[in-house]
């Protein structure tokens, strides 16, 4: 197991290094000048040059890259050009909303997908299967921002059960915070749940053809117990793979949904930083999202070994 983890850790570190290089280079080749953007198009060139020197934009690219990496390792992410405050403080403040939102969306996705996928597989080629998969296909085709608008029109404008947007903070109470995030989480989850439900159905159907399933049925084990205790666990490998990728997509998807619901999360921070060409905020936020993706994939690899020990043995 130690060799397995060491290999995965080495891959994790190498991927993070590669991602940091790509993120830095992509933002470096963007047209425009951050100092010029901050001071306006009619600013004096000498003043723009002085601000660029103050921000370190006049230094060579490789110098700024190593300074950035050193800051990432020590927790010093620099100061935002626009907000004038430490980037780390901005990110930590916004993650207090984005992380719970992503976990809520992932919880909705998992519960809906497993229930729909297993139920459809149990009614293979019957009316229930066709109906559920038809709904799943519709869910795949719905953009989450459009579904978010529909939720606002129904639950906020017509029924007035929820606020149409905004977030008062966790200081107003845990229940109030969760209520503010319910509609955004559901709008994020609907597309991912539809995709995961179809994959769950396919994986469960494949496992149901195995000999051990027929043996369990021959021993008198009930259909529900066979599905949820035996079949589902053996079908989890492809399901867990997609769940890992979907959690990363949910974090990135908050950029759109947080703007629809006017939520002060990480996604809205990235959107505002891009609009203001606040490259230091954009760079660190994008790197954070990339790190989330890589770390989630690492966790999924470890879960593979827990679910199916044969993977660990073959890797070693």
Image (cartoon, grey):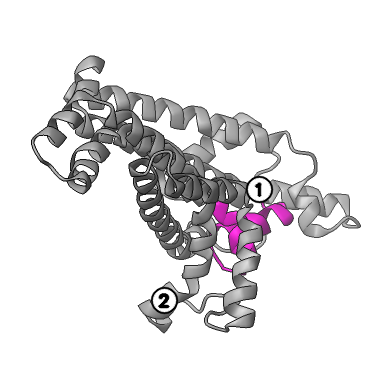
Q: Nearer the viewer, residue 136 or 93?
A: 136
Report x, y in % for residue 226. Answer: 19, 41
**Can residue 266 be found in the magenta stretch?**
yes
- Which residue was labeled with disc 1? 279
Q: Is residue 304 left or right of residue 15?
A: left
| Residue lying at 64% horizontally and 52% vertically, measured from the top left | 143
Mark toward the start of the polypeptide (2 vs 1): 2
Q: Nearer the viewer, mark 2 or mark 1?
A: 2
Task: Report the residue at 46% width, 65% height from top.
Answer: 97
User: Could you tell me what secondary structure mostly forms the magenta stretch?
Assistant: helix
Whether the magenta-drawn stretch holds residue 133 is answered as no
SS label for mark 2 = helix
Magenta extent: 253-278
Residue named by callout 2: 170
Mark yes or no: residue 288 visible: no
**Residue drawn at x 22%, y 28% as measured from the top left:** 308
| Front-most of residues 261 and 5 | 261
Q: Secondary structure at mark 1?
A: helix
Q: Position of residue 18 (x, y in %)?
A: 50, 27
How busy is the neighbourhood of tag 1: few (under 14 within 10 Å), some, or many (20 plus)? many
Residue 136, visible in the rendered structure = yes
């Amino acid at each position: 197991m130690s060799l397995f983890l060491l290999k995965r850790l080495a891959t994790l570190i190498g991927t993070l290094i590669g991602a940091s290089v790509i993120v830095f280079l992509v933002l470096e080749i963007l047209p425009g000048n951050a100092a010029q953007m901050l001071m306006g198009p009619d600013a004096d060139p000498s003043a723009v040059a002085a601000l660029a020197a103050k921000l370190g934009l006049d230094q060579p690219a490789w110098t700024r890259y190593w300074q950035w990496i050193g800051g990432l390792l020590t927790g010093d992410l620099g100061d935002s050009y626009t907000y004038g405050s430490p980037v780390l403080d901005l990110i930590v403040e916004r993650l207090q909303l984005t992380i719970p939102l992503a976990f809520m969306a992932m919880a909705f996705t998992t519960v809906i997908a497993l229930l729909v996928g297993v139920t459809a597989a149990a009614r293979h080629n019957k009316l229930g299967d066709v109906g559920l998969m038809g709904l799943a296909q519709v869910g795949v085709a719905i953009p989450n921002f459009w579904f978010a608008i529909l939720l606002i029109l129904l639950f906020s404008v017509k029924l007035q059960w929820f606020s149409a947007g905004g977030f008062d903070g966790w200081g107003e109470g845990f229940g109030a915070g969760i209520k503010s995030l319910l509609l955004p989480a559901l709008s994020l989850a609907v597309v991912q749940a539809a995709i995961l439900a179809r994959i769950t159905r396919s994986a469960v159907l494949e496992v149901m053809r195995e000999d051990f399933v027929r043996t369990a049925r021959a021993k008198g084990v009930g259909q529900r117990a066979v599905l949820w205790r035996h079949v589902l666990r053996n079908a989890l490998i492809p399901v867990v793979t997609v769940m890992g990728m979907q959690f990363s997509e949910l974090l990135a998807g908050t950029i759109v949904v947080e703007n629809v619901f006017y939520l002060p999360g990480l996604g809205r921070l990235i959107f505002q930083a891009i609009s203001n060409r606040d490259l230091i905020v954009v760079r660190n936020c994008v790197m954070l999202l990339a790190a989330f993706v890589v770390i989630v994939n690492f966790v999924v690899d470890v879960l593979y070994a827990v679910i199916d020990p044969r993977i660990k043995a073959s890797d070693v």
